[in-house]
Amino acid sequence: NDELIPNSYDPGNIADQLRCAGVIEAVKVSRAGFSQRFLHDLFVARYKLLDAKAAVTTTGRSDRERCAALLLALTKRGVLEDDK
């Protein structure tokens, strides 16, 4: 974060860092059929900080539903592109 405050995250900065590090491109490749397998719960645990609201509102759902909600939220915010 720009303020250098511990445990303070700016989703926009995180998305930019992931994009620059090639993670977003790796997700696109994965979605195209060249997957690197993540268990749903590990994926949510790792990437929920990109959209904490989506992660919190899915509490009580299955891990797969939480992944889908997180990916949908990121797509709606423009962090990920919809490949449809």
Image: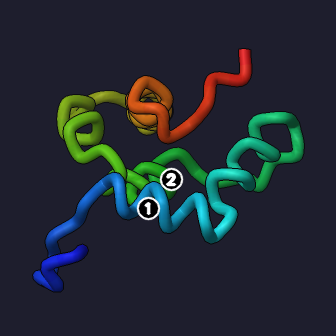
Q: Quadrant of residue 20?
A: bottom right
Q: State the image quarter where residue 66 is shown.
A: top left
Task: Say what amino acid the circle numbered 2 marks.
Answer: Phe
The disc label shown at residue 43, or none: 2
Q: Is residue 42 above or below residue 29?
A: below
Quadrant where the image shows the N terminus: bottom left
The residue sitting at 39% across, 31% down in the picture is 77
Q: In whole angstroms, how far apart are the C-alphas of marks 1 and 2?
A: 5 Å
Q: Which residue is drawn at the image coordinates 45% and 55% (left, top)? A: 15
Q: Specify few, some or many for label 2: CA neighbours under 10 Å numbering under 14, 14-19, or 20 or more.
A: some
Q: Name the residue furthest right.
A: 34
* Residue 70 placement, left or right of 75: left
- Compared to 60, does 45 lie above or below? below
Residue 26 at x, y percent in the picture: 74, 55
Query: Dot 1: few (<14), some (14–19), or many (≥20) neighbours within 10 Å?
Result: few
Mark number displayed over residue 46: 1
Q: Residue at x 51, y 53 (%)?
A: 43
- Residue 14 lies left or right of residue 7; in this view the side is right
Residue 58 place in picture, x, y as percent = 26, 31
Q: Identify the amino acid type marked 1.
A: Arg
Does 18 sit left or right of 27 as displayed?
left
Residue at figure coordinates x 53%, y 45% from the top left: 40
- Does the residue at mark 1 contact the one at mark 2 (Cβ under 8 Å)? yes
Q: Secondary structure at mark 1?
A: helix
Position of 57 with respect to 43 (left or right) is left
**Residue 53 at x, y percent in the picture:** 20, 38
**Helix, strand or loop at disc 2?**
helix
Q: Residue furthest top?
A: 84
Q: Please give the label number shown on residue 34.
A: none
